[in-house]
Image (cartoon, rainbow, N blue to C red):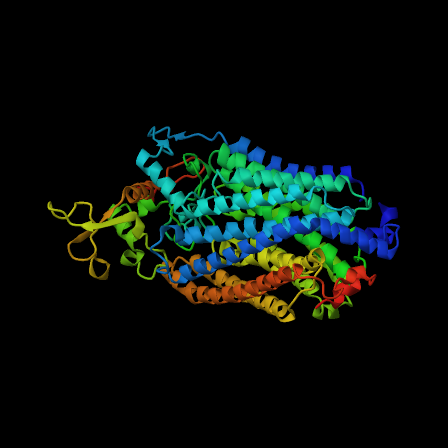
Amino acid sequence: MSYGPLLFLGILFTLATSWVGLILLPHRQMGALGQHTDTNTAAIYPAVRAGEAQQGAEHYRSLGCVYCHTQQVRPEGYGSDIERGWGRRRTVSRDYIQDKTVMLGTMRTGPDLTNIGERQADAAWHYRHLYNPQITSPGSIMPPHGFLFDVRVIGQAGRSTNALVLEGTFAPPAGQEVIPTRRAEQLVAYLRSLKSSGDLPEAPVKKEEAK
Amino acid sequence: MIKQSQTLRALLPGDALTGGGTDVGNRAALSEIDASCRVPVLFFFLSGLAWLLAGTVLALVASIKLHTPGFLAGWEWLTFANVRTAHLNTVIYGFASQISVGVTIWLMCRLCRIPLVAPGLVTVANLFYNIGVTVGVGGILIGDSTAIEWLEMPRYATPILFISYALIAVWTIVTFRLRAERHLYVSQWYLLAAVLWFPWLYGTAQVMLLIEPVRGVVQAAVNWWFAHNVLGLWFTPIGLASIYYFIPKVIGRPIHSYYLSVLGFWSLALFYNWNGMHHLVGGPLPSWMITVSIVASVMMLIPVITVAINHHFTMLGHFGKLKHSPTLRFMVFGAVSYTLASLQGVASALRSVSEVTHFTHHTIAHAHLGMYAFFSMVMFGAMYYILPRITQREWPSNSLISLHFWGVALGIVLYVVPMSIMGFIQGTMLNDAAVRFLDVVQFTLPWLKLRTLAGLLLAAGHVAFVINVGWLLVRMFEPYRKPVVRILTGEAETVAAAKQP
């Protein structure tokens, strides 16, 4: 095999096969996938995210949440995703068409977040969890995200309405309060928007379980 | 092709052939080639090692953070996600890729039997490249990561890297075109393939993910097509090219079989690039894509077993030389790890195994078996051979070589074996909905602490190696005391290498 041009062409040809097969063809198959309109309820799925949640998705990316949390629910009978309550159905390609960066994730150091907005709708819970995961989930190895909060002196008007309710060792020094920054608000808006359970022809939600 | 395979020429590296001249003339010619590579190859090696040290520190911090989340928790730029990602990018793009380029340059010149053309250009590419990596890793630490695995460097850093890669690819092809030795050795096929494949992979990923992002889960397909191929079509060919070159060179005998090397190369080229979707088993992509990748992953048994047989039979009867040659010791460790990593990879691609191991530390262990126990070990071995030749000095310390080898060998075994087992148990627990998620987290803690210990051993090995390299460089600037360069005395190079401490 000392003939250079043949080697050269063979090298280019072999990679071209998977470039066509795994990049171009899937792009043709799924690249133009659109929203689905339910014929009975006229509901459109997946909906476009609100602006604040879209900002939050950028923080989710920037903070690297994807390295410990997946956003994909595996099919029933494959793993325990459904049994753990991480979703009512598996996720499919159409669930992700609104995401600027698709963050499926490959590691479950923490639980799956595909439907965290449905599983945990309480914003106050999310703030306390982000501020220090030990408050809501003792034994967690998620790092505290104190930098998403401001600790400040309580003003003349008294305690702010959005101050975190913190007790015991987690409470700030007397006379001070913990307030979420804009980033924390946007991130929590994003987390609460995470719901991939629309009824789709390719991934129906079992009717008896659907709310 | 058949006629050629019957000759010894096809089984020996080009620089082991006499080239028609006298033996002493041959040695002098090789010495000239080595001298022409000195500056650019040293630049790639030294900056690569600087990134290795940075990557090691980042790895230790990330490892500690995972079992002690309060560690350095106050600094936003040092979150686990940032440090872990900065670690991956420094060791992949800073360390492994730069050492790869250094080794590629030197091997290509040696095998083509021509001195390096325009070494200044290659040095400029290296400087550019290091600026790119610095900007990219800095960007990750300040929160500009793209969160696309293996492609985290922000858009403002990557064009610099792409230009450097393109320069290196063009330069390698030019060297190849100008070759004085017309016979092609198996290592050259792999090297040529690697430098042609990588810019294509990187360019496609950059355009389709960062510049003009594709929609929905096609992103995941591009992501894993790229990320798996970085390993399979960039690092693996360079690693195999090195093993194919250094084992015959050090033990002084031709490779076992020409046919097996042809089969190994083309089956790798055909199957490896279809593997990527096995990272998405169970995910929201069409089943046909995932199935195709699983089939291709199983087909990888052909190149892996072929190469393993070829290397084993080349080494057969020469294992005693492992004691004397550090190059051989690292190479053989790497070659065995390549087989193990590939078999583990094939197994993990199967749906039934992936169901357990996919989202666990088993995958992390697998990545380190491939990138470290195979690839990095091979690169260390190559540097042990190349550095004395381009600096014309012997390695200063035997003890430091031993410390390096045993530190990293024990360290990586202590990393990969427990983490593979732990990942498997972790996956089994995760798949049992009756086990609380936080109990799974708690189960991993002692194993994660063990990993930090393994990391310390690896770090000790790295420091020993860097000290030895630094010492070698100091010697380079000292005047000659005695003729230490055995390759100029006419003594066969293969023998000299085997005797090398």
Viewer-side residue, B256 vs B489: B489
* Residue B440 visible at all: no
Q: Quadrant of residue B481?
A: bottom right
Residue B32, percent from left and from top: 76, 51
Q: Is residue B179 left or right of residue A188?
A: right
Relative to residue B172, is residue B241 depicted above or below? below
Name the quadrant of the N terminus of chain B: top right
Does any portion of residue B128 appear in the rendered image? yes
Direction front: furthest residue:
B479
- Vertically, is B279 above or below B467? above
Q: In this view, does B494 lie to the left or right of B335?
A: right
Give whichever of B433, B36 is nearer the camera.
Answer: B36
Which is nearer the eye, B65 or B47?
A: B47
Does residue A181 lie above or below B216 as drawn?
Answer: below
Q: Position of residue A28 (x, y in %)?
A: 54, 30
Could you tell me which residue is drawn at 32 percent across and 52 percent down? Answer: A145
Residue beneath the point at 44% across and 29% down = A34
Residue B201 horizontal/vertical position (percent): 59, 40
